[in-house]
Image (tube, helix red, strand yellow):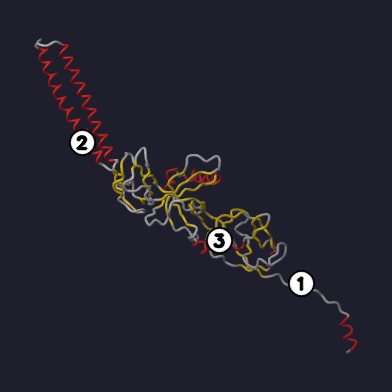
Amino acid sequence: MLAAALVACNAQNTYVPPPPPKVDVALPVKQNVTPYLEATGNTTAVNETALVARVQGFIQEISYKDGDPVKAGTVLFVIEPEPYQLALDQANSAKASADAALKQSEAEYERQAALVAKTFATKQDLEKAEAARDANVAVQQQAAANIKQAELNLSYTQVKAPFDGVVTARLVSVGELVGPNNASTLASIVQFNPIYVDFNVSEKDVLRIRASMQKRGITAQDLKKIPAEIGLQTETGYPHKGTLDYAAPTVTAATGALPVRAVLANAERQLLPGYFVRVRVPLFEEPNVLLVPDRAIGSDQSGRYLLIAGKDDVVEQRTVQIGQLVGELRVITSGINTDDRIVVSGLLTAVPGQKIEPQMKDVSASAADSASQ
């Protein structure tokens, strides 16, 4: 027994390597995807203007409270109207006098014309009557123009809202003298509904979109039917919906971007002019796009990569180009094929160049349904 024990102690131990780690792998999801153009922008008012006194006078009445929403045509300020009403009355009186003078001169012209026909008056008398009549016609026309000017000046004594909007705090007080030589700006009015969103599209995206439009036979007018989705910085997703409204005809050389604008309904005034917003515009659906779980993508100094279970189940690191996020899946624009087995879990145990025991899993495409998140 002692001899047998000594023989066993002298035997060499043989190293047995551990089995390859079990790692979950899955094939890429293949489906149609609507790509999105994402940008940041600012909200701007459709209409915003200063309310200005166009005639001189004392403020007689302020008919709104600071910050009131008003309808188009609402009287906001009343400038003392009496001087302008008197000017209108004088213009009407001058017009009546001109009408009477013209009536008399026309009668005189007709009388002289009849006398000339009977050789009881000279042609010179007729020419004088004609000149007097024409002069009174000019006076009558001037009187009519004076009435229109007086009526216009009288209308300017009521400063009205030019459109539906919200009026800012007043800049003048009752009894203050306003007009061309004094304070002219009385307040401002801002229209909130609808509201614009201005943003820029890079030159690279412009070229890509134009090429896609040409391929699909889509015209520039069709762009105004494309929806635009807006989200505030404190909001999840893009809850505000609108449509594209305008694209500049030229790219700005200084920035290499194309100014674009969307328009949104804003009846509840959820968006205020000047907000910084996120913009997302759905483009044209692309078929047979490959997607993988976003968590499976790694990054290093060379860029983004995926771990692939390659030949003989040896792990391979593959550099890829990524696209947009669709729910929990990420679009892969290049670097993989439909039959590549992507390592989706156990990434720490899957080492490039080493063998693994792949466990096939199904990546659910249902995650793509949450693309709006």
Residue 121, x across and y down, in percent: 11, 11
Residue at image position (21%, 33%) is 90
| Circle 2 residue | 89
Looking at the image, residue 170 sits to the left or right of residue 150; the answer is right
Q: Which mark is residue 17?
A: 1
Residue at image position (47%, 42%) is 248
| Residue type highlighted by circle 3 | Leu
Extreme residue in the bottom direction? 1
- SS at mark 3 in the image: strand
202 and 366: which is toward the camera: 202
Residue at image position (41%, 48%) is 45
| Residue type highlighted by circle 1 | Pro
| Residue type highlighted by circle 2 | Asp
| Circle 3 residue | 329
Q: CA distance from mark 2 to mark 3?
A: 78 Å
Mark closer to the observer (1, 3): 3
Of the image marks 2 and 1, the number of the one nearer the N terminus: 1
Residue 50, x across and y down, in percent: 38, 44
- SS at mark 1 in the image: loop
